[in-house]
Amino acid sequence: QAILHDYAARSPSSRAAFLAAAEVLPGGDTRTMTTYTPYPLYFDTGEGAQVRDVDGNRYLDVLSNYGALVHGHNHPALVAAVREQAGLGTALGGPGPLQIRHAERLCARVPALERVRYCNSGTEATMWAIRTARAFTGRDVIVKIDGGYHGTHDWGHVSAFVTSGPSFPQRLPGLPDARLAQGVPRAVLECVVTVPFNDLDAARRVLRAYRGEVAGFLVEPMLGVGGGVPAEPGYLEGLRTATEREGALLILDECATFRVGPWQVRHDLRPDLSTFSKIIGGGLPIGVFGGRADVMAIFDPSGRDPVYHASAFGANNLSLAAGIAALDHFGPGDIDRLNAMGGRLRALLDEAARERGVTGHAVGAGSLGYFHFGAERPRDAAGTAALRRGREDLRALLHLHLLNQGFLTARHGLLCLSLPMDDADVAAFAAAFGHALDTLR
Ligand code: PLP
């Protein structure tokens, strides 16, 4: 009660905004994830590592737009790049030099990226990677991870939120209709097979069972929405071998994990296709899919039966200008510093829980973290779901208590660091976290 009372007392303008928003936006927001009870805070400005809500309260932004930002807000170099480009034209109806410069930077950083194409979001990037795999292999089936998140297109939606994708060995019976499946048609459900994360045997079994049918195996190196569960050593390497053996393409979704490595570079992995988005656009919408030159050649208009790929604002100059500045201000030293800070944050949160006798632990990788209540360390999305079950209220109160203390996090537990932060910020957050645990206890 006290937590809710404090929340209401400091956010009357957010409450008013929520009521006004509900008249024009179902549920008062545009993103399901950013909406929470009793009503979300509405933000109007950001500066460095802080954001300000419409009541004028300031928050340390330990969310970074769900991992989509890493430079904080209003980074001078990014702002300057966008300002300059805005005066030069945002989309000129033809290719320009900026996409070459951005692509050169990406390909130089990620050896498996031999050729890339641009779109406007991570959703589009994974959708296009899937289509690329299908067009290249001439096969239909996509294997994805149970609880893996790849954006909001039909294929990615299967078993991210719709848990009824046909799991091996059952293929067709019992599929819900499109309404029950959140609008995902049966035709798509029939072509997506899901396997638990970190279970190499299950992956091999499915690839064998669908021999000759699997176009691609789509996987995040760390389950993001699925609870910050990193791939165990050998898992992705095992998938690499297994997919190659079966002639299926390995698609690594690095939309979230570019900031920690990227993962494939850290772990010396060579997927056939990869997807990137979020921080590589410097705060503006962007998506990239790419990989093997022989695979990506299907898009070359001078080839035989080229695959048609279009996007009115794909590779637009504003996103590219911001993205080039973002990449130029996010070097290996920055990545190492942030990753180390993430490690310290997880250690401090573990310590805060241990000192108070609270069963819980921090997971994640590099600058991406999660806190779970409960003793078991999740290996897959089912493990995360088991930890979350029955603890929704506890999570909600922790989230609100942290907001009351001036720390913005995600209700589902994501913690995400950014370049303007330092160790004092991490220590302050850990102290607030400990205080919240004291109250909740
Ligand atoms: N893939 C992963 C791993 C993500 O984390 C996300 C976004 O959270 C996406 C894809 C979708 O990206 P977007 O929201 O830009 O469509």
Image: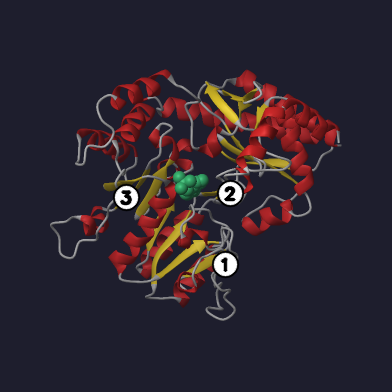
Q: Is residue 389 left or right of residue 188?
A: right
Compared with 424, 43 (above or below) is: below
Figure check: 114 above or below 102: below
Q: Which residue is mark 1?
A: 181
Location of mark 3 (residue): 290
Percent x, y for residue 216? Answer: 39, 63
Q: Nearer the viewer, residue 401 or 29?
A: 29
**Circle 2 residue:** 225
**SS at circle 3:** strand
Cα separation between marks 3 and 1: 30 Å
Q: Amino acid at mark 2?
A: Val
Camera-nearest label, 1 or 2: 1
- What separation in Å lies between label 2 and label 3 (alpha carbons)? 23 Å
Question: What x and y, as percent, mark residue 412?
Answer: 66, 44
Check disc 1 and report its element: helix, strand or loop: loop
Q: Amino acid at mark 3?
A: Gly
